[in-house]
Image (cartoon, rainbow, N blue to C red):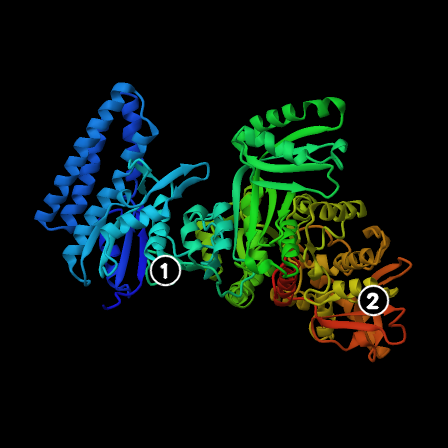
Amino acid sequence: MVNPGPWVVHKFGGSSVADADCFRKVATILESAPATRLAVVLSACKGVTDALLRLVALAERQDGAYRGELAQLRSRHAAIASAVLTASSAQAYLDGFDRDCQDLVGILHAVELTRSAANTVSELIAGYGEIWSSRLFQRFFEERKRRGGPVLWIDASRVVVVDRGAWGPGIHWDESRAHLRSFVPEDFAGTLVITGFIAQDRRGVRTTLGRNGSDFSASIFGALLGAAEIVIWTDVDGVLSADPRRVPDATVIDSLSYNEAMELAYFGAKVIHPKTMAPAVKDSIPIWIRNTFAPEKVGTLICARPVSALPVKGITSIDRVALVNLEGTGMIGVPGTAHRLFGALREEGISVILISQGSSEHSICCAIPQEQAERAAEVVRRAFERELKDGQVQSVDVDPDLAILAVVGDGMAGTPGIAAKVFAALGSSGVNVRAIAQGASERNISAVVDGRHATRALRAVHAGLYLSPHTLSIGVIGPGTVGRVLLDQLASQSARLRKRFNLDLRVRGLLSSKRMLLGEPGIPLGDWRGRLGEQGVEADLARFLEHVRVDYLPHTVIIDCTASPAVAARYADWLAAGIHIVTPNKKANSAEYSEYQRLQAARRAGGSHYMYEATVGAGLPVVQTLRDLRDTGDDITSIEGIFSGTLAYLFNVYDGVASFSSIVADARQRGFTEPDPRDDLSGVDVARKLIILGREMGQALELKDVKVESLVPGGLADGSIEDFMAKLPRHDEAMKKRLTAAQARGKVLRYTGRITSAGVATVGLEELERTHPFANIALTDNVVRFATRRYCDNPLIVQGPGAGPEVTAGGVFADLLRLSAYLGARL
């Protein structure tokens, strides 16, 4: 006798058989299946089971509308039948449907009279949806005649025998196999179309397998037929690494072990239910999860020994959880406390989701569904009433509105560092962990967090474990001279950073002095100028911040490219709220020392990062070099240099041929000066940089402590910028005299700043020998010389361009990338 080949079971859910087009898609999938013997398990058409149960509810309320709604169900199935069947076959199908409707009306009328439906009646009625869909499909598939062999319809309620126990339906395998053999010969070589969801009890009465029952049916028939594999067809591409509604970058998991799938399913992932897998697991039958509407996608394989390089497969959560905490010194070393706690909860039918206890035994807590929280508190207080009175148990507390985050993967076992990444990701995103649980298998790490932060936690951990791009929600304030260049740099590098480092620098807001642009999910940076002009709205800092700081993105970054003291004054509040700041704005770090201290305290309190390398030397590593010297134990003697790229440019170019005022005007046009050149010429900008470096050295410097020589002529410090630029040429002669005098002595003019370990800080124009390191620099170079205990005979020098939008924006960009690395990105 010819071996007919192995069975392959295909199960299609309600969304896969929702209408006539879906029926055709299912048929096409089956016709392309390679196996010679197919068992096709069908759910009811989408929404039909709920509609049938609604009929029961209407009848119990003596609402005759159930007749009309039953007629609507007939109309829906008739429409599918007329679209996919020949007229005669459709009529034959509807004849059977009408007989079912007559039976249903009789049953529902009895319910209406008694105002009550027994559970057996509800299950009997609920199972008609699978009968109707599978009968229709059997006729349709047989008529197409595109696949060899007969197409046989199987009513599962005449095959599968179950007993309902405390853990759900239990299968009587021997009886079920005998029933199946009576309908399907061993050498049958064709297609079985099987009703999902329904079965019979030991009395032969039709019952159901409960929710997810059709998946259970597929697994049962896979075991009964000795199938080579089971394919669950649904409306997603496979099992996802997280809920895509909360983690948009969730990806399809290539393969899972049975245990991994069960863990993910238990914690709410959209995957086959753990109980429904049991028959397949028992016989080691592989299960595929695939998409009816994208059959070209490979899907997810669930099997005993998956081949996958990923230690973590998925991250999921359970929402609306409460934490019950039992605490008391009298619990220490007393056996049976946990038994009494969980026994009391069990007696009240309260489900325990998670348990956590420290080794001190001083407290034990468990997570339960929130709707059971108050009842659980009463039960536990009653169970420990005596201990509470005697003071042996101090408290029974219930904390509501929590969520459980679960990280699942067989590969976590024996792999150091997974838990560290999980909790580092939660910590860096400002998510507090209330309780932790991990089994000895190391397959699951669970953490209880505030329910309001659940989405942020999911995204942070998903990115922290490199299952999705590491996303920063960015708001840029000041898309002007430096800001516009930064945005263009981000636009040019974003795709590369995402592809190479899985880093998503998502600019969600732009704020200028008058207008702002908010984007969801982000602003396309290729055309940000046009969008700001066309789609921008009136600037509103509070609304801007609210948009950029969204709970579902774990890291919020404000990039301040202004020179505004008003914006800088907000830094402390932002840092305290956990918002990271990247800026070239010197105003915050050079404000009054008490404000500087408040800023640093806010940063520590908020666990946030404050990046300001570009405040001194634009893109040069001046601040970081100073930190490295101090952190490694060196002693700073003095720091001196040319700290203004603007003034470096002016005195490199100024040779007496062109007037000093014309050179200032040209530098302003090129973007080498602040919007108001007096901010540079006054020396205050250099003084602020000395204050920043002095405070990095540990000195409590104030602006008034710096001796500054201003190059702003007397009488021009006030007034408009235009007025200043118009009157500056009147003072060209005085500057020329200083230049001529220096040249006569063989020297050059350079505007320098110096700070010593004693806190002496000076800023001003000085004459230097032509051989001095500060005398021979490129046009806009900054040069900073560190004299230290280590670098005493030959000071350490940092030199390079210190002005201009490109290098300043580059310094800000570099700080942003450093921040990304601090937050867990792999750069």
Residue 89 seen anywhere in this rendered image of the structure:
yes
Residue at label 2? 640
Using a 10 Å C-alpha cutoff, classify the residue at mark 2 as few (fewer than 14 neighbours), some (14 to 19) or many (20 or more).
Answer: many
Q: In which quarter of the view is residue 355 placed?
A: top right
Q: Position of residue 17 (x, y in %)?
A: 27, 48
Q: Quadrant of the C terminus?
A: bottom right
Cα gap from disc 1 to disc 2, whole angstroms = 75 Å
Q: Amino acid at mark 2?
A: Glu
Residue that appears at 80% across and 59% down:
693
In the image, 746: left or right of 503? right
Earlier along the polypeptide chain: callout 1 or callout 2? Answer: 1
Q: Position of residue 818 (x, y in %)?
A: 66, 62
- Picture layout, residue 604 above or below residue 47: below
Residue at label 1? 229
SS class, disc 1: strand
Q: Position of residue 567 (x, y in %)?
A: 65, 47
SS class, disc 2: strand
